[in-house]
Image (cartoon, helix red, strand yellow):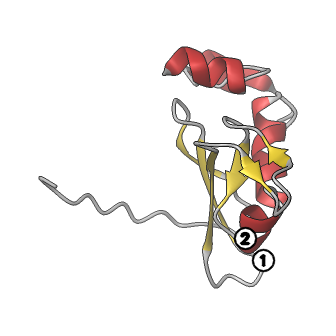
Amino acid sequence: MTRIVHLAIAFEPDDLVIASASRRTYLGVSKDGSYLHCVHPLPVDLVDANGTVIRRVGALTCNCSGGQFRGTCYRTKQAEAFEAGLGFPDPAWLAEGFDAPVGAGEAQESFRG
C-alpha cells in the first residue's frame, strides 16, 4: 500500500452513494445507522448448502447479513434499480459519464474483465 485516502462523506439515511460506477460499487447507511452497506458485484456464484446457485457471479450483493445469506438486501435492490434506470426520475446520470448502463450484469462484468 502506497497511501491511504480518507474521504469524509456525509450520508443521509436514504442516500445511496456511488463509490465507483465503473466497478458497480455503492454505499448506504443501515436503517439503524450502525454500519454501511457495501453493494458490489459477486466475484463467484453464491450457493446454498445444497450447492444450488442463489445468485450468479456479477450480480450485485451486499456485505450485510442479508447479502451474505440471501445474496440481496434493500440496498442491493436500490442499486439494481439505479442501474436499470429506475433510481432517478431523470436518467441524466447516463450523460454524466457513469458506465453502468441498463442491463449491466454478467455480460457487462465479463466485458470489463
**Image quadrant of residue 48?**
bottom right
Q: Are marks 1 and 2 in contact (CB under 8 Å)?
A: yes
Q: Residues within 10 Å of mark 1 (few under 14, many from 20)?
A: few
Residue appearing at x 78%, y 67% in the figure: 69
- SS under mark 2: loop
Asked if one can make out residue 99 in the rendered structure from this viewpoint, the answer is no
Q: Which residue is mark 2?
A: 13
Residue appearing at x 48%, y 63% in the figure: 9
Q: Residues within 10 Å of mark 2 (few under 14, many from 20)?
A: few
**Image quadrant of residue 68?**
bottom right
Going from the N terminus, do you reach mark 1 or mark 2 first? 2
Q: Which residue is mark 1?
A: 31
Kind of residue at badge 2: Pro
Residue appearing at x 84%, y 49% in the figure: 54
Q: Is residue 34 above or below residue 8?
A: below
Q: Is residue 108 above or below residue 43?
A: above
**Residue, far front:** 50
- Give residue 17's mark: none
Residue appearing at x 82%, y 45% in the figure: 53
Residue 27 in the figure: left or right of residue 89? left
- SS under mark 1: loop
Q: Is residue 23 above or below residue 69?
A: above
Kind of residue at badge 1: Lys
Residue 63: give x, y in percent of width and height.
63, 64
